[in-house]
Image (spheres, rainbow, N blue to C red):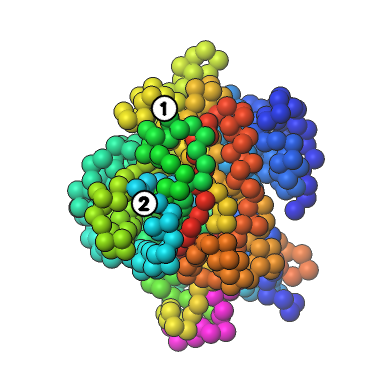
Amino acid sequence: MSKRFEVIEHTADIGIAAYGSDLKQAFANAAYALFSLMVDLKKVGDNLYREVEVTAENQEELLVAWLNELIYLFEVEGVLFKRFRVDELTATRLKSRCYGEAIDPLRHKIRRGVKAATYHMLKVEKDNGFSVQVLFDI
Amino acid sequence: MARWEGQLKKIDDYRWEIPQSYKAGMRVPGLIYADKAMLDHIREDQTPEQVANVACLPGIVARSLAMPDIHWGYGFPIGGVAATKVEDGVISPGGVGYDINCGVRLLRTDLKEEEVRPKIEELISELYRAIPSGVGSEGKLRLGQKEIDKVLLMGARWAVEKGYGEARDLEVTEANGSMPGGDPRCVSTKAKQRGGPQLGTLGSGNHFLEVQVVEEIYEPAIATVMGIERVGQVLLLIHTGSRGFGHQVCTDHLVTMGAAVQRYGIHLPDRQLACAPVKSPEGKDYFAAMVCAANYAWANRQCITHWARECFTRVFGRSRRELGLEMVYDVAHNIAKMEEHRVDGKRLSLCVHRKGATRAFPAGHPEVPAIYAEIGQPVLIPGDMGRYSYILVGTERAMEDTFGSTCHGAGRVWSRSAAKRSLRGADVARELAQRGIIVKAGSMASLAEEASEAYKDVTMVVEVTHRAGISRKVAKARPMGVVKG
């Protein structure tokens, strides 16, 4: 599957569908999509990394919890992430290593802020590969 | 997105009902305020389905309401109003939204358009410099943990006590800018970390500062009470909310509400509608945290007001008094409030969720400031960058029909990606400049997403609320200059 993610139309906000040959990859591509909405990731380095671990009631909520954790790290620590390794993914736990770079206003033009991952239209599916869908609050 | 083909029953030219029989689980009917032309638009996506979904909330009374600026949200529609019984109903963070107490604040001046016109670029540049805007923008205030807790409890009053504004500003702010019932212990450290550096910043998305000029006055006697005396008078409109703080509060409590839904055996058509009984520990904790976020937002708009006044003083070389830079009003349009309303002849204590809807209390209501007791609460309706904004007042009819609520803005018609595909930020700025509107924006992409074309015409929206009687038009203003986050 060559396409990592697609943008889904929504009137007030923006959704994404992300794909992968396994679920870990689909999750990683969803996180990649999140930061692609904010900035041109070609201009972002990956010299910095954070281990991010979240738990939730089920896999859908796990995706939302993880993406919200990344949004929190972006706002509080000013990190733009571009590369994601999901090391562990169960029904209720996710462990990841996320690589990126601290925002440099001179090189990183922030296109738009993504303020939260929502539960609306949320999907985690296996159908000819894996796909996940999430809507962001802009 | 598929068109919504459900049944709509015409009540009159501006009100359309989704019957309770439309889907299983609806506890009350839905009601959409719109004219015929708008309705066709509203049917183009699943917005009416969201109105029907909200009607499924336990304890909802009368109707699940949608204002004419309604558009597709997540869970709740944007432009939705839902009142639930405090006694045995639920509170839903989705019925408030992520940007808790996103709202608008209007200031009037004694300046005339011709005095401001030659200095508009300088004024907009000053405002852009003085008030941090854009994604993740950080302010000039550095708050320690103790100080943040004070902001969460005191709201705009904290700011005034720190010298950002004066007591009169609080008198003309909804809830006096300081809503009771907040508890900082219900707020996560993460929310405080996100909110700490962002107090006194505009943020991004649809938030803005706008220098406007009065174009038309419909009710001169009412307008005069608000300090709006003549066509050509310059105004300042501020639109922002609780920044990352409110978003984190909503995010955190949606997680606990998700578990609460199961614990209390609540069945919902959409996870994003997650809720808990108003009187449950989860419901009370959310409300206490929501109040903190509402207060944060009022403090935010108060600080911004102070710096904006300083900009006017610098640019025009006159004092704030000489400029007559007084607040007209400040209203929230994403909030839940505990209010008393009459439903079917009975007085009920209700939790009124306004998600993209403005409170519109009538003359004589105890929560309307004394100076507006005779005219009713001012209602501030921003349009988009290229068109108009409106000033209205609340009405008795709103109390009867909509729990004292009306619309909140123009309402989007285009998706963000569609707007960005069709328009370039630079072209939007140039086109506005040709019409005499100066724009400074942190991001050109965000400028395209917020272009006029992406919104309904606010005039139509306001006209429906006026004709349906849930608010009354007082004056119209058009933009001269805009700072976009």
N-terminal of the pair, mark 2 or mark 1, is 2
Instruction: State the extent of the magenta-drawn residues as a range.
Output: A32-48
Residue designated by label 1: B375
Badge 2 local density, few (<14 within 10 Å), some, or many (20+)? some
Residue designated by label 2: B111
**Does the rendering let one see residue B164?**
yes
- Give the residue at x 56% y 80%: A41
Q: Position of residue B295 (x, y in %)?
A: 33, 46
Between B45 and B171, the one nearer to me in the picture: B171
Task: Indicate the amino acid at tag 1.
Answer: Ile
Q: Secondary structure at mark 2?
A: strand
- Give the residue at x 53% y 62%: B436
- In the displayed structure, would residue B90 be above or below residue B106? above
Badge 1 local density, few (<14 within 10 Å), some, or many (20+)? many
Judged left or right of residue B101, residue B453 is right
Q: Position of residue B131 (x, y in %)?
A: 35, 63
Protein chain holding label 2: B
Q: Position of residue B164 (x, y in %)?
A: 24, 53
Between B444 and B273, the one nearer to me in the picture: B444
Between B52 and B451, the one nearer to me in the picture: B451
Q: Position of residue B406 (x, y in %)?
A: 54, 35
**Does the rendering let one see residue B291?**
no
Judged left or right of residue B140, residue B289 is right
Residue A47 among those drawn in magenta:
yes
- Give the residue at x 60% y 60%: B451
Confirm whether circles 2 and 1 share one chain: yes
Q: Secondary structure at mark 1?
A: loop
- In the displayed structure, would residue B221 be above or below residue A133? above
Residue B308 among those drawn in magenta:
no
Protein chain holding label 1: B
Residue A27: quarter of image: bottom right
